Image: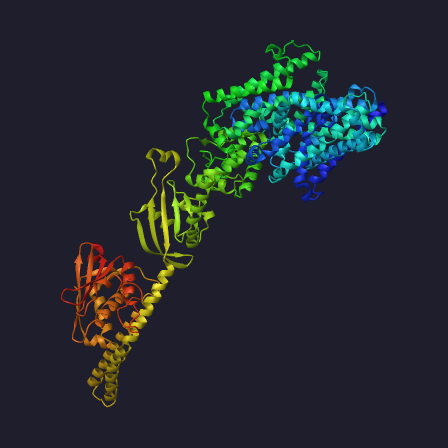
Amino acid sequence: MISEIGVLYAVGVAYLALLFFIAHATERGWLPSALVRHPMVYVLSLGVYATTWTYYGSVGFAQSEGYNYLTIYLGVTLAFMLAPLLLAPILRLVRDYQLTSLADLFAFRYRSQWTGLLVTLFMLAGILPYIALQIKAVTDSVSVLTQEAPPHLLALGFCATLGLFAILFGARHITPREKHEGLVVAIAFESAVKLVALLMVGAFALFGIFGGWSGLNTWLMEHPEALEALYEPVSEGPWFTLMLLAFAAAFLLPRQFHMLFVENMDPRALRVATWGLPLFLLLLNLPIPLILWAGQAAALETPADYFALALPVDGGASWLALFTFIGGVSAASAMMIITTLALAAMCLNHLILPAHVNQQSLPQSNLYGWLLWGRRLLILLIIAMGYGFYWLLEFNQGLVQVGLISFVAVAQFLPGYLALLFWPRATRIGFIAGLLGGIAVWILALIIPVIHESGLPMIDFNLAVVMGAEDENRWAFATFWSLALNSLLFVIGSLLTRPTREETEAAQACRREQLSPAGVTADARNVAQLESHLAQVIGPQTAGLEIQRALQDLGMQPSEKRPGELRRLRTRLERNLSGLMGPLLARMIVDNQLNVAPQAQVALADSLRFVEEQLEHSTVRLRGLAAELDTLRRYHRQVLHELPLGVCSIDPGGDILIWNNTMAMISGIDAGHAVGQPLSALKDPWEGVLRTFISGDDKHLYKLQISVEGRYRWLNLHKAAIESPAADRSAAHGLGGMVVLVEDLTELHNLESEVAHNDRLASIGRLAAGVAHEIGNPLTGITSLAQNLRYEQDPAEVDLTVKQILEQTRRINDIVQSLITFSHAGEAPRPLPVTVNLRDCVEEALQLIKLSDVGREVTCVNEVPNDLKARGNHQRLLQVFVNLVNNALQASIPGDRVAIRGTRLPGGVEIHVDDEGAGIPSGLLDQIFEPFFTTKPPGEGTGLGLSVVYSIIQDHGGLVYADSRAQGGTRFSIRLPAIEEEETMA
């Protein structure tokens, strides 16, 4: 016997060593990544749901409850059919907030240390019978194979070995932010072994016992009671209760929560699991009736729970018996390893760490090592407690019966789980009250009666008997009344209390409605201060590593000082620490040690960016009005970003909210480097331009010339204040601010300059004949004087002749210089505005025009006062007067008179150019300044002269318009801003 037991023990240890090798090979990268991350590996890892109560106990449950045994798996199928509603949101929450257990999830939502403490203690108490069940199943399976009672040390040796492998699998090093890929692959392999072993036993039952399908049909016809025994309990048994328990266990059991959410490597794999896991469970349950009927046909004396082992033994298939035994060890070990890992994390985060944090006794030198050894010791302690429970109780309830005790316990978390998803009004008081009520019924209706029936000292009390329901099914009674009292107290407690601010924020995060980050601001000025404050609790080494990880997650530099980025870093630190020690302790450490000011409001820029990130990266499909509003938001956002005007929005604190694509193109500053930053973070000249414009009184600024990256740009700036809808809400919600529109006129300006230059060239062309005539006269005089100079001997005459030649030369130079000045106006970068004497400017224009033929046939009179001055560009104003006077001359006939007059007005000056021509029809006065509009016949005018005048006067901040004179002719009027009085006197 001892040798056989030794062989079985050695086989079990060798199998566990094989699993460890698979896990090690996965972590070392020896297995292809495509295989490790394949969705079916994830699906098979969820097969940890099937423990020894499935592998062995389902046959016994089918014998007593018929086809009701399928409800345990149909409930799981129903849960996974509802995965988009029940599982996907929790998976997102676990990944976003680094939650590692069900206790973390509830502590995150129902913000209280008592929440995590109560969930951990009750989960521990509820799962211990389940752990003890696995130990019993392994020892009983050894007994079935050896036909002898196993020694007492076998169970202890199994627990010790499993504890060692549990540490090797999941507690070799602290990796709260990483997935245990090796563990997932090893558990998937175990699930495959279980499935293959059970299918092989089913095939052995069909072909080895019955001889095939015909033999099975013959036996069933001879024993119709076998089929009736499976159908009869369905109409009488607690099928709804069993399905509900399985439904809750599918995602609330510690091992299921851990594999389903914590170890998930790809959220897309959950979609495969919605059909993959039900298919796995279907295949696993197909052989159950065959094994049951084969055991009955072979008249096995072994309890039906172990027919899967007894059939190969009775049939002489020792190899199959050994493989089936390995499958049973696989089922038990997978459950115990994952469950102890999950429970150890819960106990560490919600029992051990809170006490050390409150007493400020966390180690300062090596927190990671301390946490690692704490987790290891907890794993061993939990397995030891399961072993103790195994010896305390004499399990005579059957494997599934004992497993259902844990199922009813786990079901008590269902109201809190559903409220977490669908009822934001729920409070921690309601959750704790409901859970305590459910625990009380669970103890009174199940635990006390079971302990009493086992023979241990316990009062003889049964809640079902007290309530006169002793004839009801135990599981249906306990499930109904525990959940009923739980839900009732939960609802009443929540309605009688108000959610705290933290609970409201958590509820919004759970429902994907949190559209702004937490309303706090870190007082730390830089990353080094954050690290220093954090080191006061978790030690400098751990603080440095956590800061470095958070910086890498966010792509930040250690030199970061921007307040908005430091807030993001603080939030990331909290989430990372949550994976290390739970959400409540992470919040407590970050809040207390990073000097948070709860009254400080988050900058509106950070809030807006957070909203955009949440909505853009959300994997949740919005429906109804929410979907329509999101579509409208996306449309408006796209319009805003594609608008051909630069848009810059600044919140009341001076941070940039919006920086659209056009603004990025104009400024050369990418939106990612502008949004969320203060104006002072912008490079020159934008910081000064925007700040000056925003702080100034003008709402519009026209034709502003600035230099951007070595190129001149001309801009129009417009601003508008964003008023808060309600004055009392502005401070609370960060509303208000300023929006600035930037209109890039650079291309238009360049086009206008080119048009003006072409117009000047056209004017020069028209002046060419007159210029030749004017230059010809002095040249003739110079030639005559030079010829006479050859014969002059008198020094006085020579000197006089030279002076006359120089005078004629200066005359030619003046003519040429005027043409050069006129033709080059506007080509070079414009100088700053200066004081311009308008009379001199008009006189210079008349001198140019007199060079033309028409200029000599019409009298031009300059009646502008000598002291009339304006601030502007002399050359550009010269072009204005040339164009206007030239236009007046073309409208005149020989002998007419053109007068240029000027006068001073309040705040400005006005120049009039009057002609005596035919005038302009009143219907055309509004069109004459449009480009290419002309009243001349085709080929006689470009229609650009007055358009250039209009553009130049606008640049000077002035006004130009035309009227028909009552006595005939047309008057063009120009209004220019006056210069300051001080400048005039100077």
Residue 11 visible from this viewpoint:
no
Measured from the top left, where is residue 479 in percent x and y?
A: 60, 20
Kindly identify the residue that appears in the image at 69 percent across and 34 percent down. 280
The answer to whether 109 is drawn above or below residue 450 in the figure is below
Q: Is residue 931 left or right of residue 609?
A: left
Q: Nearer the viewer, residue 64 or 726?
A: 64
Measured from the top left, where is residue 591 in percent x and y?
A: 49, 30
Measured from the top left, where is residue 731 in percent x and y?
A: 36, 35
Q: Nearer the viewer, residue 910 or 368?
A: 910
Q: In which quadrant is the C terminus drawn? A: bottom left
Residue 583 visible from this viewpoint:
yes
Q: Nearer the viewer, residue 561 or 509?
A: 509
Q: Nearer the viewer, residue 92 or 911?
A: 92
**Residue 171 picture quarter:** top right
The answer to whether 638 is drawn above or below residue 951 in the figure is above
| Display coloring | rainbow
The answer to whether 404 is drawn above or below residue 961 in the figure is above
Looking at the rendered structure, the number of numbered marks drawn on it comes to 0
The answer to whether 931 is drawn above or below residue 104 in the figure is below
